[in-house]
Image (cartoon, rainbow, N blue to C red):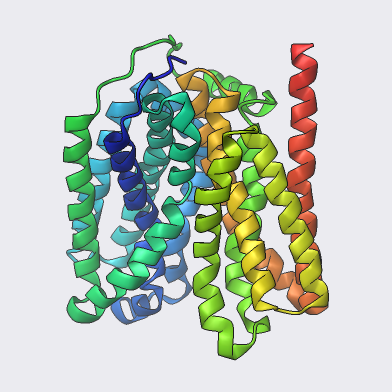
Amino acid sequence: MTDATRTSFPIIFALWGAGLGAAAQYGKVSVIFDQLPTLYPDAGSAIGFAVSLVGLVGIVFGAMAGLLVARIRYRRALLWALWIGAGVSALQATGLPLSWLLVSRVVEGMSHLAIVVAAPTLIAQVAAPRHRGFALTLWGTFFGVAFAVLAWAGLPLVSAMGVPALFAAHALYMAAFALLLAAMLEPLPVTTRFAPLSLAGVVRDNLTIYRSAAIAAPAAGWVFYTFCFVALLTVLPPFIDPSQRAFVLGAMPLAGIAVSMTLGVILLRHVSAVTVVVTGFALSAIFSVWLVFDRGDPLLCLLLAGAMGLVQGASFAAVPQLNGRPAEQAQANGAMAQAGNIGNTLGTPVMAAMIAAGGYAALMVVTSMALLLGVAVHALLSRRRRRAIS
């Protein structure tokens, strides 16, 4: 990878802004999900696909997205994805029938994948080595920040002007960042030549990703982070004191962001990103075990979320540390997208099943086990990388 000698912070913040738009492709439907039955009264259980289809696209095509974006080129793929995202949201603002809404969500899932693969790859190229940890930790906050903005600004907009206004606002946002980044970004130099796409080639490239102890490592830990974090925000609140429940639920994502942007950035200046990730997993496991004995303690919940913030930011910072070429970084980011969608999809139903089977203690034991698996998988892959060097 050709290291930038100077960091272009305006570009980094613009790429992060594009990431907020990508996260809103998920969140804009999640935050108004309770209102969809009013818009589609005959939909029944099919309405759930309006949320889940974006995630299912990520599960199926996440790793492949890294391969495609590297071939299309990062700037081009990002701009196309932003314009497609803007167009889809504009169509959704017209009040599509449910069947067409679901089709649009599949297209939106493809747009989302391209953004979350191309943007962090570009960030790694425009950040000087000394700023790369900060830049990719900032990127790692895009989901939490986007959901907070949707809750604080999106829901009042819906209350005042209806659901189509939220979709229209998202369309304008995506178009604005497409124009902004078209003016700011220059194409990266082509350093890798790819063979034409074929089914055999796609299978071979996917095997390359998941056999690599470097390319697959960020995703291998990320699946355990996403398995726990969103699920805990969903199923843990009933076990927290009702008088403090709302505050804790809102503060947990912010605690993770705050720790990742402060302690996480400081640690990344002195130790490797993988070390920070493993530290975050280990501390999170300790706090989750502690929560077994101190049921729903608000301070422990915030400490758990803060420790998981170390995993959040450093996992993205690990991508360029472990993978030197942009093509490999795109593959690693695609694998992270796939792993994240798998974790988000499986986490809540598994955690809910654990509560049904064994109550609160079972929930926290399974959480701690998942977090310790994050430590174990990184330790295993680190050993494989050391053996490959020696």
- Quarter of image, res 70: top left
* Residue 374 spot, x, y in % from top left: 73, 46
- Residue 156 position within the rendered picture, expressed as x and y whole percent measured from the top left: 26, 77
Residue that appears at 37% across and 40% down: 115
Q: Indicate whether 46 appears above or below 241.
A: above
The picture places residue 3, in percent across and down from the top left corner, at 43, 18
Q: Nearer the viewer, residue 321 or 213?
A: 321
Q: Is residue 133 visible?
A: yes
Up/down of 165 relative to 100, above or below: below
Residue 209, compared with residue 149, is above or below; it is above
Q: For the point 81% across and 73% down, which residue is it?
A: 292
Rendered location of residue 266, percent (x, y): 56, 42
Looking at the image, residue 96 sits to the left or right of residue 294; the answer is left
**Residue closest to the eye, 232 or 83:** 232
Q: Which residue corresponds to the image point at 75% horizontal and 70% vertical from the top-left?
A: 363
Can residue 343 be seen here? The reply is no
Of residues 25 and 197, which is closer to you in this image? 25
- Which of these two is toward me, 51 or 217? 217
